[in-house]
Amino acid sequence: MVMMRAKIVACLAILGATLVANPARATAADPRFLAASVQSGGSVPVATAIGDVSGDGLRDLIVANGSGGTSATDDTVFVFEQDPTHHTLPSSPSFSVTPSAASNHYKVDVGDLNGDAAGDLAVGIPGVGIDVFLGTGTDLPSSPDVTIGAPKLVDLAVGDLNGDHLDDLVSTETASSYDVVLRSQIPVLGGFTSATVLAHNVPTSGLSLGDVNDDGATDFALDGPYDAPTAPAVYLQDAGLHTFAEHDVTLSTDVTRLFLADVNHDGSSDVVAAEVGGTLGWAIGNGDGTFGTFSSVEAPQFSAKEVGDLNGDGHDDVAALSADGTLRLYVQQDGGGLGAPCSFPAPDASGDDAATSIGDLTGDGAAEIAAAEGGGDLGGATVFRQLTGAQKLATALSLAPSASSILYGATVTLTGALTNPEGGCLRTGSVKIYRSGPVGGTAVVATVPLAADLTFTADVTPPSGGTYTYRATWAGDETHVPATSSNVEIDVAKTPTSLGLRTSSGTVVFGNSLTLTATLHGVTNTPKVRFFRIIGATKTLIGAVNVDAFGVATLKVTPSRIGSYQAVFPGGAGTLPSTSPKRSVDVRVVVVGSMVRYVDRRSGTATYNCCKAFYHFFVKPKIPGGTVRVAVQYLAGGTWHKLPSSVDTFTLGSDGTDTIFLHVAGGKGYTFRVRSYFASDGAHLGAWSSYVRFRFH
């Protein structure tokens, strides 16, 4: 085969921070992958492949072990057959094959290497050659059917490189730098041709196969690091002649990787490059070996990559395994290009491109990714199963309060974060905060947005004393299930209060009013204070008044008898109750006396015919049956003298009054005065009436 050199320079301007960020595009569906491991013993796995080598039409997982274990598992290639019923992989290998030589750098690939439509296995052994295990239709032979000498082998791939619809072996081998070598499958007779050099003295050893011009013929690119302005070459196969023309691409920045992928779904492979500064760029192919300008997304460096449909839309996406134990998936967006990565934890996976592989391991048409667990020395592989249908990834939501015990009125800061232990892209959204407790039942008290790092913060103030429970919820998204945090409890202590009471007077005359003044301390609002009157063991509510901004409430009362008063604050949602001391108030009766039935009245003195006068008296409040003492004095020599009487006490009638007559023998010509007295009776203080005067003529 002759290689034609048609050097075409296509300058890929990588501007600014070397790659130009692509404008916003319509968003494609996020990928969903769930990781599980298979075990292949205690040796260190170094390579994987996915393909049908058991003849049942279902793809199997192949894991190649290097050294590091025992003779039973070292330098052995294990096959995990896909279960035809459940479409799962066994946890331990179904069978194994043994390469012709030991290596810690095996390269494995699957294809039809003898034209019988059965899957075969190619095992590249750097520094030795290529082992070919020809499938029997049910399994593989335990040792290679043929070993092709290739002592300078570095990398290996399987593909149709001459348009005869038969899989060939293409490899890179050391020369002054590297050569790309083709060993074509021989039709009918089987076996492979001797090595043909497709490209000589190329600067890097990685192989990336694709179809750059959508002509159905396999083209290739050389994957690896390049220092600008070295031109990484893309080789286009002539669909008729099956020769290759080199199309060089000039970079303006250093790259660590360069490979082919159709990132705009036009049927032609485009160039994807990992730039040293930390971006993943792509240049859309023009279909003739030239490419447009680069667009990019931020991307860490990676050691292994795979290309395939990672979200079920039929478009090429890119998977990259980084040294930090993370598998990042760059999904092709609607309209072309790659979106920001969705990350999946792969703590035990490591290695170069040989360590990873892509293919359908679950029989549902969706691609899985396998990665050798060399980093964990576990002897196996992590298989990332692509979820389909309604399956979603797990999430977790944390919630923590700034304090678990507070005084009423204090604010608590709730903080939390949404995490995805199984990986995937979590889109920003909002978290709802629920509260349940003594007041308000269960209710949403806050809806807070998730920050870019998926954390959130909410300040809450419990509405009363008692124990309140808070929880956070996230509604989920297209690829993740909803999440609910654990409950957190906040104990709210009520604020103590104190209540004082004073009266405007300690003694009042019946019928007069006084003011009760209550002062409440320890509140920030204006609650009601209740006022009570206490008579003996009876406590009667007489009013309820809201305190003012200073905590003061007043109530005007008109006492009817001796008693005590007390103010009570029943407590509030966040405040403790308090009661004032009792304040006693004495009530003095009013005694009124007057002369009645007189014949004349002058200057305030009543005049009667000798020698009988009439005196009427009553007490306020009415006290039927009460006793009143009457005292009479006469004026002689300018001095008032007591007038003795055999009877001086009288009982009030049912109406609380009485009228008596005063008979004074020899009283003509004298002036008299009279008054009445009601003594204290336990309910009231006693009192004298005023004097009233009378005389006889």
Image (spheres, helix red, strand yellow):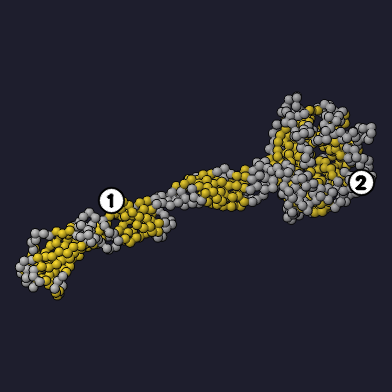
Locate residue 26: give its quadrant: bottom right
The residue type indicated by label 1 comes to: Gly
Above or below, 582 against 177 in this view is below
In the image, 96 versus 576, the foreground residue is: 576
In the image, 149 versus 38, the foreground residue is: 38
Answer with left or right where residue 409 lies relative to residue 626.
Answer: right
Foreground mark, 2 or 1, reads 1
Locate residue 34: give its quadrant: top right
Report the disc number at residue 238.
2
**In contact (CB < 8 Å): disc 2 and disc 1:** no
Report the disc number at residue 536.
1
- Residue at horizontal 78%, vertical 52%? 336
Q: Where is residue 510 in the image (x, y as percent from the top left)?
A: 25, 61
- Residue at horizontal 58%, vertical 44%? 485
Of marks 2 and 1, which one's residue comes earlier in the chain?
Answer: 2
Q: Position of residue 551 (x, y in %)?
A: 39, 58
Answer with left or right where residue 505 lies relative to residue 421.
Answer: left
Q: Where is residue 90 in the image (x, y as percent from the top left)?
A: 74, 31
- Residue at horizontal 55%, vertical 52%? 445
Q: Would residue 681 be visible to someone looking at this image?
A: yes
Answer with left or right where residue 403 lies relative to residue 244.
Answer: left
The residue type indicated by label 2 comes to: Asp
In the image, 668 versus 631, the foreground residue is: 668
Above or below, 41 against 400 in this view is above
Locate residue 240: give its quadrant: top right
Is the C terminus in the top left, top right, bottom left or bottom right quadrant? bottom left
Number of other residues with Cα within 10 Å of mark 2, as a class: few under 14, some 14 to 19, many 20 or more: some
Above or below, 371 against 293 in this view is above
Q: What element carries label 2?
A: loop
Q: Which residue reaches farthest top?
A: 71
Q: Position of residue 204 (x, y in %)?
A: 82, 42
